[in-house]
Image: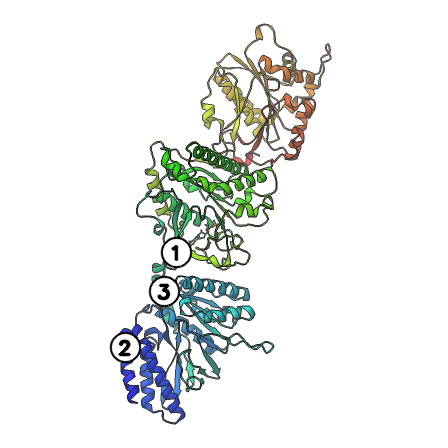
């Protein structure tokens, strides 16, 4: 007993500095229990021994790890939460060991590589209550941010942890998983945690407590066992109930390492020897039955949730501001650009666009936080590098507003000065236009390198005064761009392949983000050649598609986190990062945008913006506004090209046979296009120097035709209105060069509803026997030569074809704007077999037969025409 007293006294003194002296104290307990067990067996246990055991137990499992958290000195005072750093082993109370001479606390070691297994699963209410009690003890004791608890409840499908709901809601405890597949995913997370902790050998950053209400089977049990063998540096603590599982076919279950085993026997439990610290000489464990502690008081659970929830959130919360550097625009992009994206535990994680990770592939199901992640990256970069160091091309294919905040709006004139072009709800054709622009820039840079006789972008930057910023081009929902297997998708694949392969040498970096990596037909056979150039993979929840098929680390990620993998998704290269929610910090984000905008250079221009849903008006077109009389050949404006700068779509009307315009399609916007085409040519003539003959032949176009006539008259032009018969006459007149006083100047025959002139044109002249169609065809060929141009709207392609005498005469009306005309029909008319055109609202195809131009355009509509009317 003398030795016992001495060790006890040492332990009590040691309590002042429990961490350093815990080992000594634990030795005291081991000593004591050994002696107690031995003494008990020999009938030598006395009330005094038990009394001392009780005191030692209270010293070892202090605060919330022991009793109810009350101290011996003042039973009414509760210890504070969050005192343990959990870096090494701790003693945790399981229940009360009873002997004939009284009871003492039964403790087991946990953490620091020590684990616990109970033979009955959580369907035994005592086991379920103990598991809850242990979770609460550890959470109450752990310093904020030092403990992460993951639970699996296959025994009761989540029911075991219902009493701990307040902790789940407070974010202190993860939602329990309940299926075998989920358990496998959970093990992925724990293994990843262990790998990262072991790799970063400095210290255990965060203890991951894994609580399972029943043991998994097969391979997952082997994985679980391996975790128990991983040792203290893995930072994992396993508490598993229902181990060993009922034996299957006599095969012994894998042995757990450093695990105290508890065996249930009626109302008592038998606690085995902890690893490395024996209660017994013969391995029989603690020689006293243990009454397990029951449920934690509900009030304690509530209080813990309220107090600790807040503290943990504050301690681990990551705000948008954490991503930003102290000083703006101090970075040099000579060797790459990098930004902090979030944290792994307490470690900040930076990602880079450089030679090692030139391009990124980002995956995540919809709603997984892809947009938020991209915004975090983009704002982080824009805060670090000036527009001379970094330029952004942003392209979004989904209906949404991912990048809308980078461009000026009616309410907020600010923009991100790095943004060169921003596409919102982009068309695939717009995407291709942006990629072409990037390729042009790449070629420009390649030529500049050659010119300066250098091989690296950094050297070029030194040799020239003109800034050569690195370019980061983000394409969100890029699978839309590559959908199908048409000419657009094929061109996009070719461009992407080239940019991915050569971009890194020229400071051009791509981020491809998508909710789906599968079923992209156009990529067939090209995935390796393209995605092989994207070593950095970012998998958000549901985004495992960007990782290796054997890497399922993104399976059960919570929102706000991502797997970062710089090795093209290989299973052993994951880091799980938490990133802040830029959407939640809208005021801060707006403040940053304003700050950056204010810093822009005086000459900075807002980005070229494409909003797929917006209609366009000729009056807003700077080209239209700049048109003046006296040009060499009048331009007839019909819309804006779907390209990076949204350039004006027009046809020059010169003297070549066939320089006429046909607008085709039943969409009422046909009349609007004709209106814009007519007014634009009118601006290029002095009043009195051109004749406008307007034939409003269909009721749907009457209002627009009247508007056109008044606008022309207001501009001082001579306007004559024609009906079908008069049109027939004029066509006859213009079939040959005019002679006499009407000669000279230009004549525009503007026909709203040319198909309605069919009957009149079909009539033959009683004298010459020439039909109106004969005259029309002659006029189409020769008219431009003497200044006559037809601007007509046909509602059907067939009628147009008939009027010109068959599709083989298509060059006789060389300028075509196709509205809602099926692509196949149009392809047939034009003799182009793989024409990629899908008619849709607010879009048209411009075809110029003479210079082989085919462009997707946003056709002009009259202001006030609502979008749903447009098609
Ligand atoms: N770091 C985060 N922390 C907390 N919540 C987040 C975080 N990131 C995203 N979220 C939440 O997830 C929601 C969806 O995010 P986001 O809009 O970025 O998803 P998405 O993947 O772009 O979805 P979709 O493809 O459908 O547009 C956000 O409204 C936000 O509330």
Q: Residue furthest bottom?
A: 43
The residue carrying mark 2 is 14
Mark 2 is surrounded, within 10 Å at the Cα level, by few (under 14), some (14 to 19) or many (20 or more) other residues, namely: some
Quick one: label 1 or label 2, which is nearer the N terminus?
A: 2
Q: Going by the image, does 788 lie left or right of 712?
A: right
- Residue labelled 2 has its Cβ within 8 Å of some atom of ligand 1: no
The residue carrying mark 3 is 203
Q: CA separation, marks 1 and 2?
A: 36 Å
Quarter in which the N terminus is drawn: bottom left
Q: Is residue 559 above or below residue 254?
A: above
The residue carrying mark 1 is 343
Regarding residue 17, the answer to whether it shows in the image is yes
User: The residue tagged with tag 2: helix, strand or loop?
Assistant: helix
Q: Nearer the viewer, mark 3 or mark 2?
A: 3
Given residues 833 and 709, the one toward you in this image is 833
Q: Name the residue rendered at 44%, 81% in the picture.
A: 272
Tag 3 and tag 2, C-beta contact below 8 Å: no
């Amino acid at each position: 007993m003398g030795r016992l007293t001495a060790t006890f006294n040492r332990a009590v003194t040691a309590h002042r500095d429990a961490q350093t002296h815990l080992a000594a104290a634990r030795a005291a307990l081991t000593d004591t229990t050994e002696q107690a067990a031995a003494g008990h067996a020999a009938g030598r246990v006395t009330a005094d021994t038990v009394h001392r055991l009780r005191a030692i137990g209270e010293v070892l499992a202090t605060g919330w790890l022991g009793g109810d958290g009350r101290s011996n000195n003042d039973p009414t005072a509760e210890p504070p939460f969050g005192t343990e750093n959990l870096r090494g082993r701790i003693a945790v109370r399981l229940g009360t060991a009873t002997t004939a001479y009284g009871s003492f606390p039964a403790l087991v070691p946990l953490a620091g590589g020590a684990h616990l297994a109970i033979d009955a699963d959580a369907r035994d209410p005592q086991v379920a209550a103990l598991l809850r009690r242990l979770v609460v003890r550890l959470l109450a004791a752990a310093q904020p941010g030092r403990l992460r608890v993951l639970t699996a409840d296959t025994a009761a499908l989540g029911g075991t942890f219902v009493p701990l709901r307040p902790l789940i809601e407070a974010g202190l405890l993860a939602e329990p998983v309940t299926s075998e597949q989920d358990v496998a995913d959970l093990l992925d997370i724990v293994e990843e945690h262990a790998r990262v902790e072991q790799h970063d050998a400095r210290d255990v950053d965060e203890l991951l407590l894994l609580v399972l209400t029943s043991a998994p089977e097969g391979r997952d049990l082997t994985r679980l066992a391996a975790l128990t063998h991983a040792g203290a540096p893995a930072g994992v603590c396993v508490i598993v109930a229902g181990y060993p599982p009922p034996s299957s076919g006599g095969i012994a279950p894998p042995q757990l390492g450093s695990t105290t085993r508890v065996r249930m026997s009626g109302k008592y439990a038998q606690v085995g020897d902890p690893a490395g610290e024996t209660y017994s000489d013969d391995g029989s464990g603690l020689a006293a039955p243990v009454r397990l502690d029951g449920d934690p008081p509900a009030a304690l659970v509530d209080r813990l949730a309220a107090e600790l929830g807040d503290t943990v959130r504050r301690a681990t919360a990551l705000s948008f501001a954490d991503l930003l550097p102290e000083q703006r625009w101090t970075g040099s992009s000579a060797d790459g650009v990098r930004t902090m994206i979030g944290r792994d535990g307490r470690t900040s994680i930076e990602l880079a666009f450089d030679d090692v990770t030139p391009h990124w592939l980002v995956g995540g199901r919809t709603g997984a936080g892809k947009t938020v992640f991209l915004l975090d990256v983009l704002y982080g970069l824009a805060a670090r590098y000036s527009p001379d160091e970094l330029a952004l091309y942003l392209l979004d294919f989904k209906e949404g507003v991912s990048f809308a905040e980078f461009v000026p709006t009616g309410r907020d004139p600010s923009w991100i000065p790095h943004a060169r072009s921003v596409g919102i709800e982009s068309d695939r054709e717009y995407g291709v236009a942006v990629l072409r622009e990037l390729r042009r820039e790449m070629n420009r840079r390649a030529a500049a390198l050659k010119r300066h006789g250098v091989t690296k972008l950094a050297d070029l930057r030194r040799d020239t005064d003109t800034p050569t910023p690195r370019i980061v081009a983000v394409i969100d929902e890029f699978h839309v761009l590559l959908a199908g297997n048409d000419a657009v998708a094929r061109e996009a694949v070719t461009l992407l392949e080239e940019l991915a392969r050569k971009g890194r040498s020229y400071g051009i970096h791509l981020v491809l983000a998508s909710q789906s990596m599968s079923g992209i037909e156009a990529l067939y056979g090209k995935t390796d050649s393209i995605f092989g150039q994207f070593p950095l993979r970012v998998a958000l929840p549901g985004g495992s598609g960007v990782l290796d098929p054997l890497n399922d680390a993104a399976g059960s990620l919570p929102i706000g986190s991502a797997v970062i993998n710089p090795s093209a998704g290989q299973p052993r290269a994951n880091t799980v990062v938490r990133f802040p929610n830029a959407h939640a910090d809208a005021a801060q984000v707006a403040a940053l945008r304003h700050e950056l905008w204010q810093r822009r250079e005086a000459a900075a221009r807002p980005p070229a913006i494409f909003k797929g849903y917006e209609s366009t008006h000729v009056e807003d077109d700077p080209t239209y506004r700049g048109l003046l009389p006296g040009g060499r050949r009048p331009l007839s404006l019909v819309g804006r090209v779907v390209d990076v700068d949204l350039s004006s779509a027009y046809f020059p009307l010169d003297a070549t046979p066939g320089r006429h315009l046909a607008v085709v399609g039943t969409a009422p916007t046909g009349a609007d296009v004709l209106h814009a085409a007519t007014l634009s040519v009118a601006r290029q003539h002095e009043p009195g120097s051109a004749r406008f003959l307007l034939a409003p032949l269909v009721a749907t176009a009457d209002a627009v035709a009247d508007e056109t006539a008044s606008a022309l008259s207001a501009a001082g032009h001579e306007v004559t209105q024609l009906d079908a018969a008069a049109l027939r006459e004029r066509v006859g007149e213009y079939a040959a060069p005019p002679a006499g006083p009407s000669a000279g100047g230009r004549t525009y025959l503007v026909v709203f509803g040319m198909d309605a002139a069919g009957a009149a044109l079909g009539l033959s002249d009683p004298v010459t026997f020439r039909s109106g169609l004969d005259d029309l065809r002659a006029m189409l060929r020769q008219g431009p030569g003497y200044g006559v141009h037809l601007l007509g709207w046909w509602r059907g392609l067939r009628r147009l074809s008939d009027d010109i005498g068959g599709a083989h005469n298509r060059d006789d009306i060389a300028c075509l704007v196709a509205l809602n005309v099926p692509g196949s029909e149009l392809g047939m008319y034009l003799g182009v077999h793989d024409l990629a055109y899908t008619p849709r609202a607010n879009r048209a195809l411009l075809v110029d037969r003479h210079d082989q131009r085919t462009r997707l355009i946003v056709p002009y509509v009259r202001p006030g025409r609502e979008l749903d009317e447009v098609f």
